[in-house]
Image (spheres, grey):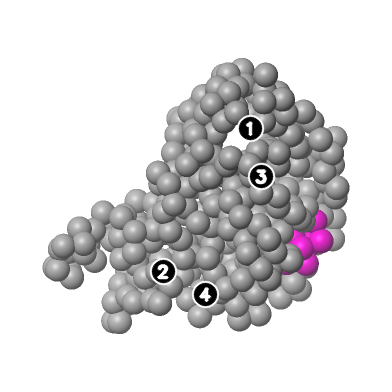
Amino acid sequence: MVTLTKIDLPGKHIFNGNEFPVAYEISGDSNNNDKIEKFLQEKAKTGFFIEQLDKHGAIVIRNSNNKNLNPEIISKFIKAISNNSGLEFFIQNGSTAKRREVTEILSTANEGPHDKPIYQHNEFSRFIKYPTTLFFVCDKINAKGGETPVVHGGELFEAINKEIPEFNKELSKRGLFMEQIWTLKSDNNTHWSYKFCFGRNIDPNDKDFENNKKIAIKLAKEIASPFCEFNKDNDLRISQYTNPIRIYESKNGISYPCFFNSIATFYANVKLKIGGYSKTKNISYNDGGEIPQEYLDLTLQKSIDLAYNHAWQQGDIVILNNYQVSHGRCPWEGERKILVSMWDEIDKADYKPWLV
C-alpha cells in the first residue's frame, strides 16, 4: 500500500496561516513505481493536489527511499497528477535560458553557469501566455549549494507594502515595462530560431530566412507580446507591457494581491551583470517613467530574505503554483540536475491585475 505521510520542512514559512511549502513523503510500497503511479492518479482525482497548491502555494513530494527512479518514471508520476487534476501540458516558448528536452514532458531547467545565482521570477509572467503549475524534479544531486529558493508572492507584496507602499501603488497604476532581445545567433541555444525560444514551428530544412523570421515573429506575437520586431542585425526585440501585481482568488473564497513578475531577476541581471543582462533593457514603468533604484533594491533584497531555500534530495518533486510562487536558483559546486515540466489549468480564468 502506498500513502503520503506529512513531514516537516526546516525553514518553512507561514503565510495566511498555512505552511509554505507543505511537504509529504511517499511511504509504504515506496519502491513499487506502478503502485505509486496508480496511487497518485487516484489521489489527484479527489482534487487533493490542486487544493493543496491553492492553499499552500507549493508542495514538496519526497521519495528518498525509492532507488528505482529516472526521468521516464518521474514523468509518469507527473502525468498521473496533472492529467487527473484538470491540467494540460504547457509548451515552452520564449525561453531566455538554455534548455534541452529529456522526456516527452520534462526538460532541463536553466542550464546557465553553475556559479551564478538566478533570482526570483514567476515563469513567463511577462508574456501573454504563462503556465499555472510547475513541476521541478531532482534527477541527480551531489553538490554543495544548489538550493532552489521559492518566494510566496503574497508574502512579498505584504513586505514591500509595509516599507514602500507607494511602489506597489505605482506598479498597479503604471504597470511594468521590460524589453528583451533574442539574438540571431548564440552559443547557448537562446537564439530566436531555437526550439525553446521562437523556432518551434520552423522547419529545420527550410532555408528561406525571411520565411523563418515570419514564423518566429508570428509565434512571438501569439505567446509573448504584440510588440515584436527584428532589428537591423536580425535580432528579435520584444517589448512587454505587463501588470506585475495580480489578485489571487483562492478556491475557498479568500483573495489577496500577489507579486507576479520578474523584477528581481531582471533587475539583478542588469545591476550585477549576470545571466543575459546584455539582452535586457533596464526595466521601467509602462509609460517609460524611471523606477527609483531604492525601490528596485528593496524588492531584490526582500525576494532574497523571504525565500524558502529548498535543499534537494534525489527523487524530490516540487510542485509550484506559478500564480502565487516565484522561484530562482542558488549557485553550487558538484553534480546537480534539476528538470522541469510546465502545465496549465484547462479553461483557466484570467489572472486579474490588482488595481488601486
Query: Residue at horizontal 38%, vertical 76%?
Result: 186
Q: Which mark is residue 276?
A: 4
Quick one: label 2, few (<14), some, or many (20+) residues within 10 Å? many
Looking at the picture, which amino acid does disc 4 mark? Gly
Frontmost residue, 298 versus 66: 66
Q: Which residue is mark 3?
A: 316
- Residue 151: where, in percent of width, then height? 73, 52
The mark that comes first in sequence, 3 or 4, is 4
Q: What range is drawn magenta here?
A: 300-306
- Residue 53: where, in percent of width, then height? 67, 34
The mark that comes first in sequence, 2 or 4, is 2
Mark whose residue sits in front, 1 or 3: 1
Frontmost residue, 291 versus 305: 305
The mark that comes first in sequence, 1 or 3, is 1
Quick one: label 4, few (<14), some, or many (20+) residues within 10 Å? some
Looking at the picture, which amino acid does disc 2 mark? Thr
Q: Secondary structure at mark 4?
A: loop
Mark whose residue sits in front, 4 or 1: 1
Q: CA distance from mark 4 to mark 1?
A: 41 Å
Answer above or below: position of 331 versus 22.
below
Q: Secondary structure at mark 1?
A: loop
Position of 104 compared to 271: left or right? Answer: left
Position of 58 compared to 228: left or right? Answer: right
Whether residue 302 appears in magenta in the rendering, the answer is yes
The mark that comes first in sequence, 4 or 1, is 1
Q: Is residue 245 visible?
A: no
Q: Secondary structure at mark 2?
A: loop
Which corner quadrant of the image does residue 43 belong to?
top right
Query: Residue at horizontal 45%, vertical 30%?
Result: 347
Mark whose residue sits in front, 1 or 2: 1
Q: Main secondary structure of the magenta part?
A: helix
